Amino acid sequence: MSHLALVLAANPLTPLEHLARHVLNWLHFSVGLPWAWSIVALTVIVRVLLVPLTVRQIHSMQNLQRFAPQMKEIQKKYKADKQKQNEELMKFYRENNINPAASCLPMLAQLPVFLGLYYSLRHFSRESPKLHPGSLSFLHFIPSIAAHTTTHWGGYVLLVVYCASQLASSFYMSASVDKTQRTLLMVMPLVFVFFIARFPAGLVLYWVTTNLWTVGQGLITRRLIPKPPAPEKRTSRTPPRDEGDGGGNGAKPEPSGRPPQPARSNQPPRKVRRKKKAGRR
Amino acid sequence: MTVVRRLPAQLGIGLVWLYRLTFGALFPTTCKYHPSCSEYAVQALRTHGLVRGSALAGWRLLRCNPWSRGGFDPVR
């Protein structure tokens, strides 16, 4: 018991490291995956475990899309005061029985995995290779997942892939965030590359995998959720036309009742174009 | 003396800031509560000290899940 207390006092994150190492050992020795692919598999397992949380988030996102125009109005109204904007949004959520899609727990659930992996990879580079038999390389271009990312040219390739995947995942994760915040989030990973370059390559591999998972999830989510800007544009375009027609000519309410007419008026140029194309052919 | 007493809580606040500048900056999730979880943690540590503050912050994080309602939830 005292030994356990000593271990915990030395590093409170040791249990996380042991857990990560146990899972990696199981994937390597029992399942038979190489070490690098064990990291990929570990990441996939974590993300699969988080799927129920994500599904729930998708549902609340779908619900949020209905209220997107009103929420944008609130955001515009209190653009200068972020705190007031947040408070008003929260009020709006309450009043309309909305469950906001974003929450901290699913994201933070990944933090212990990340830290556990970081410490166990650091151990890999320090301990005798006898304790982890087998190659530490990944796809022939990274010689060791336990070494710093920048010790080999392959690491730089991995960093480029990381940047691309991080940008893509930020793009999908920040769909509901306003524009300035979004650009900031897109720039962030580029700044972080300098820190990440000093991490073990295996950790970058974890990050790339989890980002790619996020992107894949984003692609599926996009299909499930109707695009929010489309209906908004339609509503902003149509009212001025109707108003213009109604205000300019008093006798025009009847034509406005026939929607195909303006569509027909647009058709002739298209026909001409088609004829031209046909002529060219 | 008060400085010494506040030291553990300040350490906790430092850790929250470390999180904010590193891991937190990488993930664009906006919290469903107001104040956000990290802001709540800082306030809780400031008013209740390290032990109670951490417990309150931990409980808040558990509440910040996809099934909860969210909303205005200040430190009491």
Image: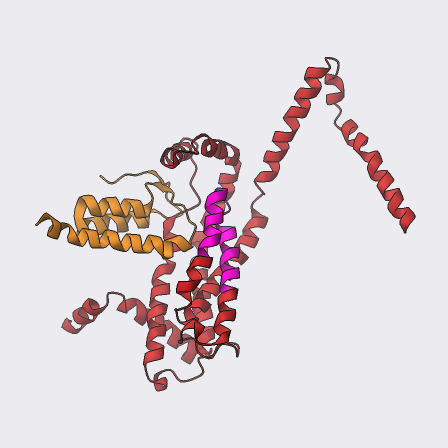
Residue for point 35% across, 87% down: A130
Residue A91 coordinates in the image, percent (x, y):
38, 32
- Number of labels in the image equals 0
Residue for point 43% across, 84% down: A134
Observer able to see residue B34: yes
Q: Residue furthest right?
A: A279
Residue for point 50% across, 75% down: A153
Q: Kindly indicate which chain is depicted in red in the rendered structure.
A: A
Residue A31 coordinates in the image, percent (x, y):
45, 77
Between A4 and A164, the residue placed more toward the observer is A164
Q: Kindly indicate which chain is depicted in orange in the rendered structure.
A: B
Left or right: residue B63 compared with residue A89: left
Which quadrant would the N terminus of chain A be assigned to in this image?
bottom left
Q: Is residue B50 magenta?
A: no
In this rendering, the answer to whether A185 lies above or below A20 is: above
Q: Residue furthest top?
A: A250
Query: What residue range appears in magenta?
Result: A162-189
In this rendering, the answer to whether A221 lies above or below A2 is: above
Between A177 and A39, the residue placed more toward the observer is A177
Observer able to see residue A108: no
In this rendering, the answer to whether A18 lies above or below B34 is: below
